[in-house]
Amino acid sequence: MVEIKCYCCNRDSEQVELRPYGPNASLICFECAMSTPEKEAETERNYALQLEAALAKSNIIMLSEAGPVPVINKDDLN
């Protein structure tokens, strides 16, 4: 079985909710993401990059554990 862990504290997904907002989309828990001003800023930047990428594909997005996900491809709307 593959263990999915926070890249900072190594707690697994059974213990904490993990999101892909760490460096290079690595998984991080909320506590670690907000633990220092630097990590908080990095988490916000990484979220914004994922949101921007999703909005480039669709005006409609869904927020999920995998981050922002486009729902409808903009090309399909034309």
Image (spheres, grey):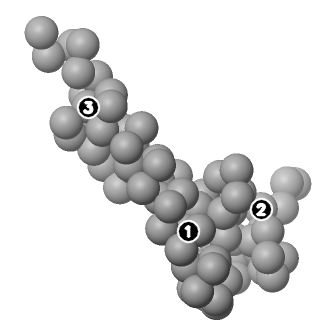
| Number of the front mark, 3 or 1 | 1
Disc with the residue nearer the chain's start (2 vs 3): 2
Q: Nearer the viewer, residue 67 or 47?
A: 47
18 or 37: which is nearer to us?
37
Foreground residue, 47 or 73? 47
Q: Residues within 10 Å of mark 3 (few under 14, many from 20)?
A: some
Residue 20 shown left or right of residue 12 in the figure: left
Residue 51 % position (x, y): 38, 49
Q: Amino acid at mark 2?
A: Ile
Question: Is residue 22 something that shows in the picture?
Answer: yes
**Camera-side residue of 53 and 12:** 53
Q: Which mark is residue 43?
A: 1
Camera sees residue 19? no
Is 56 left, or right, of 34 in this rendering?
Answer: left
Secondary element type, mark 1: helix
Question: Which of the two discs, 1 and 2, labels the residue nearer the N terminus?
Answer: 2
Q: Which mark is residue 58?
A: 3
Query: For residue 4, which numbered disc appears in the image?
Result: 2
Q: Residue at x 70, y 75 (%)?
A: 14
